[in-house]
Image (cartoon, rainbow, N blue to C red):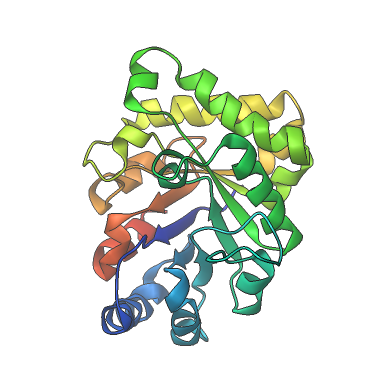
């Protein structure tokens, strides 16, 4: 039985005061989350603050991105060893905003995935299609290409150390959500793609759904056979809403 994971991606939001209030709210209600594993991914500059605030709780700490290099002259970048050093256990790689706003390729995403593993961080690998790609019937082609870039570089066994997040780009921050069946169909496709390489890895890997998940639709999404939780954006900035999503797991 694959344990549900609900991870909050705070993106570029918050300040010291608002983050302290948010984490205080999460700590007050986390005992009511019975089954799901929970993690939050703050902006880099607040990782140490959130680590300290989360001490003694079951809430994990993750980062939103990682450099593909471990050290050196890479101004503005943050390495996997640095993230491990400040207490991170996981890191998001290949989020659609990195791919489509900043032009990061599938190959760079695969190298970031590898860098995360070198630092013993759990990569949360994001895959997903644009609206025009879905409308032109290319969803599976796009997601397969994004996934294959990682397995070609690292091998399918590397997914045993990872989590995958399917995020249809057209549903991120738009209020639109893939129907539970649409999401399930893509999760089943991803698992099937992995199964063709290694059935054991396919059975073990957790695949999260991301894209306007909220408390009102989380239970229905998480009830699907191949959906093991969510990567939550805007709703993770509200303690009560995020906790209610976590309880749905």
List x then y, in percent, for residue 189: 55, 24
Direction from residue 195 to residue 50 in the image, left or right:
left
Direction from residue 21 to residue 74 in the image, left or right:
right
List x then y, in percent, for residue 18: 26, 79
List x then y, in percent, for residue 187: 51, 31
In the image, residue 54 above or below residue 81: below
In the image, residue 51 above or below residue 217: below
Hey, which quadrant is residue 195 in on the image?
A: top right
Given residues 56 and 142, the one toward you in this image is 142
Given residues 221 and 234, the one toward you in this image is 234
Direction from residue 16 to residue 204 in the image, left or right:
right
Given residues 155 and 209, the one toward you in this image is 155
Q: Which residue is drawn at 43% across and 49% down?
A: 230
Quadrant of image for the C terminus = bottom left
Q: Which residue is drawn at 78% across and 37% down?
A: 155
List x then y, in percent, for residue 216: 23, 48
In the image, residue 70 above or below residue 141: below
Hey, which quadrant is residue 50 in on the image?
A: bottom left
The mark total stands at 0
């Amino acid at each position: 039985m694959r344990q549900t994971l609900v991870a909050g991606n705070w993106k570029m939001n918050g300040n010291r005061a608002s983050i302290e209030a948010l984490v205080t709210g999460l700590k007050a209600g986390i005992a009511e989350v019975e089954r799901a594993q929970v993690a939050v991914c703050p902006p880099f500059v607040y990782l140490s603050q959130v680590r300290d605030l989360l001490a003694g709780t079951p809430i994990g700490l993750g980062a939103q991105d990682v450099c593909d290099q471990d050290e050196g002259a890479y101004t503005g970048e943050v390495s996997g060893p640095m993230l491990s050093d400040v207490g991170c256990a996981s890191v998001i790689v290949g989020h659609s905003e990195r791919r489509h706003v900043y032009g990061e390729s599938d190959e760079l995403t695969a190298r970031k995935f590898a860098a995360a593993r070198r630092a013993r961080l759990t990569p949360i690998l994001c895959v997903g299609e644009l609206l025009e790609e879905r409308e032109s019937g290319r969803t599976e082609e796009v997601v397969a290409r994004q996934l294959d870039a990682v397995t070609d570089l690292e091998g399918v066994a590397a997914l045993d150390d990872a989590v995958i997040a399917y995020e249809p780009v057209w549903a991120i921050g738009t209020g639109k959500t893939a129907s539970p069946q649409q999401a399930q169909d893509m999760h089943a496709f991803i698992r099937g793609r992995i199964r063709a390489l290694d059935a054991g890895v396919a059975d073990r890997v957790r695949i999260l759904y991301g894209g306007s998940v909220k408390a009102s639709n989380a239970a229905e999404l998480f009830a699907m056979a191949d959906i093991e939780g969510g990567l939550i954006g805007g709703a993770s900035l509200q303690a009560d809403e995020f906790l209610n999503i976590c309880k749905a797991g």
